[in-house]
Amino acid sequence: MNPGKFSRLITFLILIFFYIPIAVVVLFSFNASKSPVWVGFSLLWYKELFTNSYSIWKAFWNSIIVAISASFVATALGAFGAIGLYWGKFKGKDYIWIISYLPLIIPDIIIGVSLLIFFVFIKLRLSLFTIFIAHVTFSLPYALMIVFSRLQDFEYSIIEAAYDLGATEEIALFKVIIPISFPGILAAFFMSLTLSIDDFVITFFVAGPGSTTLPLKIYSMIRFGISPTINAISTLMLAGTIVISVFMRKYLKYIF
Amino acid sequence: MLGSNVEIKNISKFFGDFQALDNVSLQVKKGEFFSLLGPSGCGKTTLLRIIAGLEQPDSGDVLFDNKSVINIPANKREVNTIFQNYALFPHLTVFENVAFSLRLKKISETEIKERVGKLLYLVRLEEHKNKKPSQLSGGQRQRVAIARALANEPKVLLLDEPVSALDAKLRQELLVELDNLHDQVGITFIYVTHDQAEAISVSDHVAVMNNGKIVQTGTPYEIYESPANNFVATFIGETNLMKAEVRETNEEFVRVFAKGIGEFECYKDKEVKKGDKILLTLRPEKIKISSKPLEGLNSFHGIVEEEIYMGYQTKYFVKLDEGYILKIYKQHVNYLLDEKIIHWKDEVFVSWNPNDSFIIEVEEN
Amino acid sequence: MKYVSGYTLWLVIFFVIPLIIILSFSFLEKTPYGGVNFSFSLEGYKSLLTIGYLKVFWRTVWISIISTLITVLLALPAAYYIAKSKFKNLLLILVVIPFWTNSLIRIYAWIFVLGNNGIINQFLRFIGLIDSHIQFLYNPWAVILVLVYTYLPYAIIPLYASIERLDNSIFEAALDLGCSKRKAFFKVLIPNIKTGLITSIIFVLIPAMGSYAIPDLVGGVNSKMIGNEIARQLTTAKNWPAASAISSVLTLITLLGVILFVRNSKKEVLN
Ligand SMILES: Nc1ncnc2c1ncn2[C@@H]1O[C@H](COP(=O)(O)OP(=O)(O)OP(=O)(O)O)[C@@H](O)[C@H]1O
Ligand SMILES: [Mg+2]
């Protein structure tokens, strides 16, 4: 059944709705004036961003450090978790699935608040390290599910074939299971990276003084009102997003 | 001989409450081509997996060359499997799939090249050695699976319906190839199939399974010609089953009466006495169809109910005067020169030698 | 088992235990500068029963439900169109880009367009239509607008995935049997994409219920939601038991909601 005119109209309105505000933000990042009235093309705000914005860059590097380290840990733990759930036969799998789905169902703010209270309770000083812990925590279930659904594309007999040919458990793991789940592992890593760089709410609660990440920095800038510097950052981040989106599209099927 | 003999002793296996294997025992000789034949779900794969060590039985033992291997894990048993779905490693090329087990043994690169090369030559895949499994056809995948399983130089090769995923013509070709391969490598093959024609055409011995039990073991000839029971008779080839009552017996023959047919003689291959109820099997190709009765045979009059021309043979369904419908396959030797061509609605006589029917079940009086 | 242990341990320590902690703290006494006294008290919950809180709860619920409704109703025809379009790869990319775009940037885009100093107000001032500004933002409808904007891609993608998996011939069969297109949509498409529909509703409703940044940045004083209240109790009011109590109630509501919803829709599918 071909879609009717109605659904086509809705789709195009949605795309316009998606892109008009973004397009306006991008356009005005090249405006020569500080106020949002077009006066002419200029790269003034990019120059400002690259020369005069120490705190933004600091926040950016904080984000990068947290994202890379948290994604490594989350991907490793999540991938091994997925392999264990796929491979092993043991009791309690259901409970592991429940605690994997819960973080996806429970609102982010609850995860942020509960981690904040937990950190204060165990007297762990809020810092980049607590942000790292929080980011690993919320990325883990995604990493697990992505790798798991990749593994599910294969019949279990492939592992038995490895054993049958003389492989030990380690060899089956490193020569067969990890290589075949590698696209999933890669997807899990990039998913974790994106989730980490994107996160505002959870980070907002578990960040301490001096551990501002880029979203936190942007948030505090937005609270001061609109400014062409934010437009410039937004444009650059958008460019990065487009690259990621094109790259990640084929892995999206492992997420849904 | 390079192969091992395999002995299976009283194996039982439960999945929860469901009994997949019920006290199965088997003997497979060194180097023979042995088939496990049975309908879907009867436990063939389960038995094979127990031999491979991929599954543990609840009771019973598996012996290779008279030594128990029940405690040896799959990766140490001198047996390799060709899986029902081939289970090729999707991330490795054909060459690397075949080399997988050799690489585990720390064999030098030159020797690996040589041995894999030989195997790929054996299965005629040299040109495809750098392809990934996803780039191969079904028949080629199967051959990779064979080469991969042989690389380890196993003493026993287990094949789980290796041709069932392929089309009929290719199936025949690969079956012949498998048979040749078996002659070349000389190891023991245990071949699982639900296709009786496959099992009969290539095996030295066949075990017929049903509901987790072995119902008959024998050469293809024995299984086809003297089935042990109703199940084997109908599962393997086609047959006419007749219920009859024993009227008279002598040294070699029995005279029986069957409702719908009448009185006739049959070979006494089981001990029976007067008044016993028996089940007889008679293969359709053993029956002659003619316009006149034949001397010295069991002969009955009837009318051709249906005629199916198959090219190499014609199938007739003949309704006897008393009502029984008999299946008859007539092979065409000289089609047009055969005495008289018989057609639909013709009146005919059907005749068979008393030696050709078998008693498969006896219900004593 | 050993492969799962790291994963499980991490989630138990940093997810399950913190949840248990806030649940327990919600039944304790507060201390003036944050933290708790370890003695039982229902004060945290009692403070929730004031008119002010009930209003915030109610507002959170209706804003979330309306946003979810609008989002899913828009997402359904769009997902369907994309799944059947010749240009589906391109269209999908166009939906996926906002999905991966930082949510603060997407909120900012609306502030930039509709804010008191945003381009629309500047433009209206520039052509002399107004002197000061029209306040488009800082009301519940602005919150709904930005919620829909933010979560629309989250609704489209699972719906798209489940429509894509469908065998096209079931529609042809429906049309062949005399169904109108509209009827085929409701009688054949919808029942067959139940899981996608459930996923997309959950993906929108839950973040909406727990939203913090959107009402904080584009909502006014009378469009604060539960999330803002939790943050206020935790940071400025330093009332941990109250923050824990609100969090526990919010968790409970979402969990119950999801369980009931999933169970009901499963039953319907079975019927
Ligand atoms: N892991 C398992 N758990 C539960 N039941 C099983 C398991 N494996 C097999 N079975 C059951 O045991 C029976 C025998 O299965 P098996 O795979 O051995 O059949 P098969 O003879 O190979 O059939 P096919 O020709 O279809 O491959 C089936 O009824 C099957 O459902
Ligand atoms: Mg099988």
Image: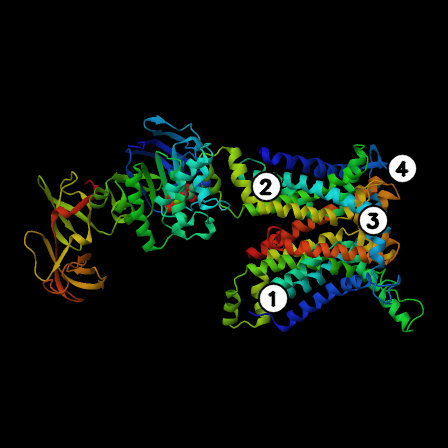
Co-location on one chain, circles 4 and 1? yes
Q: Nearer the viewer, mark 2 or mark 1?
A: 1
Q: Which mark is residue A195?
A: none
The kind of residue on which mark 3 rests is Ile
Q: Nearer the viewer, mark 4 or mark 2?
A: 2
- In the rendered structure, which disc, 4 or 1, sits on the residue that comes first in sequence? 4
Provide the secondary structure element on which disc 1 rests.
Answer: loop
| 10 Å crowding of disc 1: few (<14), some (14-19), many (20+) | few
Residue contact between numbered discs 2 and 1, judged by CB atoms under 8 Å:
no
Chain of residue at mark 1: C
**Mark 4 = which residue?**
C33
**Mark 3 = which residue?**
A56
Distance of label 4 from label 2 (alpha carbons): 43 Å
Chain of residue at mark 2: A
Provide the secondary structure element on which disc 3 rests.
Answer: helix
Say whether residue C147 is left or right of residue B165: right
